[in-house]
Each structure stands twice: as C-alpha cells, then as structure tokens.
Amino acid sequence: MTFTILAGAGLEENGYSETVTIRMMEIRPQVYLVSWKEQKGTTVSQVQDYEHGLLYTNITLPSGDFYNLQGTLKPVLQ
C-alpha cells in the first residue's frame, strides 16, 4: 500500500509518502483488520468496517506516543 500524508504531524510543507507491506485479515464479511509498520518505526492497526462505513485506527510512534482515532469510509464515486 502507498499512503500520502499531505500536512500535519510536524511534517514539512511537501508532506510525506511511503509504500508499506500490509497484513489484512477478514474479521467477518465487510470488516477487516489491517496493520503495517513504517520505515520510521511507526505501527498502525486499523479496523475497517465497510458495512457501517467506519474506520478505527491505533497508531504507536517510535517515541511510544499512542493515538486512537476514528473516522468514516465513503465509496469512491466514479
């Protein structure tokens, strides 16, 4: 997976992009546990609930700081 962070989190103006290897496990139909580790040591675990359009994310930084976030998922309109 390739992700791009456009701004925030103390990043320089140009943002940041990285390609990572993900692990994906189906918990039940339309619900997945997705995780990866970034080059800088940040780990990310997500529960992606496509049935309800919800995303739950846990992020652990190399410093030990921990973030627990929630968001929504929306289909891409074509």
Image (cartoon, helix red, strand yellow):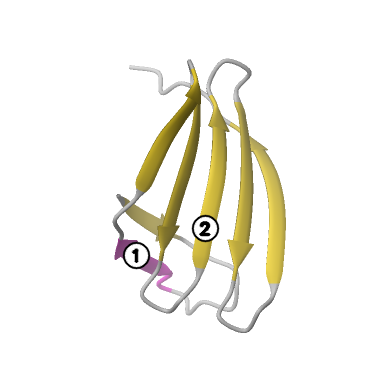
Q: Residue at x 40, y 72 (%)?
A: 14
Q: Residue at x 48, y 15 (%)?
A: 29
Q: On the rendered structure, is 23 left or right of 6?
A: left
The spot of residue 2 in percent (x, y) is 30, 53
Q: Residue at x 29, y 55 (%)?
A: 21
| Magenta range | 14-19
Secondary structure state at the residue bearing disc 2: strand
**Quadrant (top left, top right, bottom left, bottom right) of the C terminus:** top left
Q: Is 4 a magenta residue? A: no
Residue 46 to residue 68: above or below: above
Query: Number of labelled discs?
Result: 2
Q: Residue tagged by mark 2?
A: 44
Q: Answer with the quarter of the image where residue 39 lies.
A: bottom left
Residue 3 to residue 73: above or below: below
Q: Residue tagged by mark 1?
A: 17
Residue 77 to residue 25: above or below: above
